[in-house]
Image: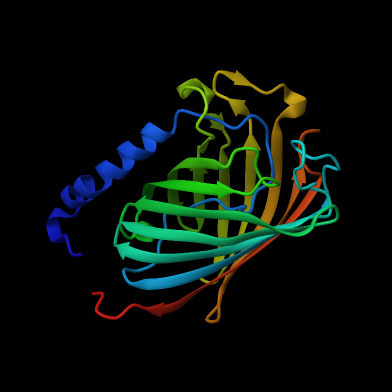
Amino acid sequence: MTCGPKIWACAIRSIAPCALMAVALAFTSTTAFGQTDEIQVYDASIAEPGVVNLTWHNNYTPDGRNLPSFPGAVIPGKSWNGGLEWACGVTPWMEAGLYLPLFSVSKDKGMTYNGSKIRLLFVEPHADGHKFFYGVNFEFSFNSDQWDPNTYTSEIRPIFGLHLRPWDFIVNPILDNSYRGGFHSLDFAPSSRIAYHLKDDWALAVEEYDDIGELRNFYPRDRQFHELWGTFDHYAKWADVEAGIGFGLTPGSDKVTLKLMLSRDLFKLPHIP
């Protein structure tokens, strides 16, 4: 699809139905922080139209919580969580994604299938070339019993950032939901990133991931989840690599978590301009 000079009018007409649907679904929240298959701050970059991309998410918790977040949940300590994220550029301002499978390998349950997710990511076209950039990601999840007490959940992830080369400043003020309650029961789980680009193909970053609780009633400090991360990015011909180590700042956080993400473009669909 080509919008030409009217790209923003096309974007508004195309995004509006999806955005309204997502907002309508968003009057809910989670009740406690669980684990995650994806530890990443979104920077509004997407695949080119027609390009199919694969990202392999891997997170391991060598020193984490030894009690489940809810009855029957995967225990975070010594668990490996992750999944395969399949993405395809649809237009210069939209990318569609599918997470399948999502998995865990834990000391209490062995290997488990945790579910799947679909997402729609809308961004300012060619965000890498703009000083200020923005976007929003809508994510809809199907969860296995040991991964989340709610079978269906979703996420609204606004994206705001500045490219002040060689520095990047990015925030994702995420709202999670579980289709229970009203607007004020949405769960606030923001993430943020400050990155310094050493060269075109290397960057170092500090990231923070939080879960503060429902908008109407934030968790007590000792139940909140706050992790501070040191990460690096390497953009190679064979794959983009993001790896790092995170340290919990509160009793409700895992003490040490490791992450590794490998991403590459697989192929371009035929007949896509």
In which quadrant of the rendered view does residue 95 lie? bottom left
Drawn side of residue 176 relative to residue 255, left or right? left
Q: How is the image coloured?
A: rainbow
225, 21: nearer the viewer: 21
Q: Residue at x 64, y 29 (%)?
A: 31
Q: The C terminus appears in which quarter of the rendering?
A: bottom left
Q: Position of residue 73 (x, y in %)?
A: 75, 43
Q: The N terminus appears in which quarter of the rendering?
A: bottom left
Q: Residue at x 77, y 42 (%)?
A: 72
Q: Position of residue 217 (x, y in %)?
A: 60, 18
Task: Say if residue 60 shows up in the picture.
Answer: no
Q: Position of residue 202 (x, y in %)?
A: 58, 68
221, 119: nearer the viewer: 119
Task: Say if residue 22 shows up in the picture.
Answer: yes
48, 141: nearer the viewer: 141
In which quadrant of the rendered view does residue 20 lie? top left
Q: Position of residue 50 (x, y in %)?
A: 33, 72
Q: Is residue 212 above or below residue 102?
A: above
Drawn side of residue 161 relative to residue 194, left or right? left
Q: Residue at x 47, y 60 (%)?
A: 98
How many badges with numbers are in the image? 0
As drawn, the residue found furthest toward the left would be 5
